[in-house]
Amino acid sequence: MWLDNASDIDILFYEPYARIIADIAKNEQYNPLTAGVFVLWGAGKSTLLKLIGEKLKSQDGIICVTINAWMFESYDDAKTAIMEALLQELKEEVPVEEESQAQEAGENEDEE
């Protein structure tokens, strides 16, 4: 049986696709952006997403969040569970100083 893990080696030659998708994601003209990857099991979706994430990880203003949706398949309300995981990941990724700056900006707007 094959493992269902993203490959560390691009044996499927997905790098050109990852580069194109990462370039599109960086282009503010196309944002907000939603992309779907629809292929059969084992065709390399996780590997492609990992390659895209590697290309975007050093990009200012972009946070790549990886959520394994299979973890939530038995949940009655999978959408809520996935959103909770997304918000938790974002909370971990956004630096505290940015958070406090945003709160201060909100307080200053309230005062005006």
Image (cartoon, rainbow, N blue to C red):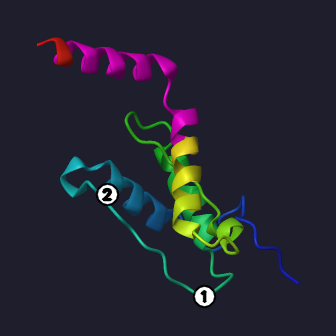
Residue assigned mark 1: 40
Q: Classify residue 91 as left or right of residue 59.
A: right
Give the mark toward the camera: 2 or 1. Answer: 1
Q: As rendered, which of 90 and 39 lies closer to the eye?
A: 90
Residue 55 visible: yes
Q: Amino acid at mark 1?
A: Leu
Magenta-drawn stretch contains 14: no
Q: Position of residue 47 (x, y in %)?
A: 63, 66
Magenta-drawn stretch contains 103: yes
Our reading of the magenta stretch's main secondary structure is: helix
Q: Residue at x 21, y 13 (%)?
A: 108
Residue assigned mark 2: 24
**Which residues are drawn in magenta?**
90-109
Q: Position of residue 20 (x, y in %)?
A: 38, 62
Q: Classify residue 37 as left or right of residue 60.
A: right
Circles 2 and 1 in contact, beta carbons < 8 Å: no
Q: Residue at x 70, y 66 (%)?
A: 71
Q: Residue at x 72, y 58 (%)?
A: 8
Most extreme residue toward the bottom is 40
Q: Which mark is residue 14?
A: none
Check the image and report above or below for 17 versus 24. Answer: below
Check the image and report above or below for 110 versus 82. Answer: above
Q: Secondary structure at mark 1?
A: loop
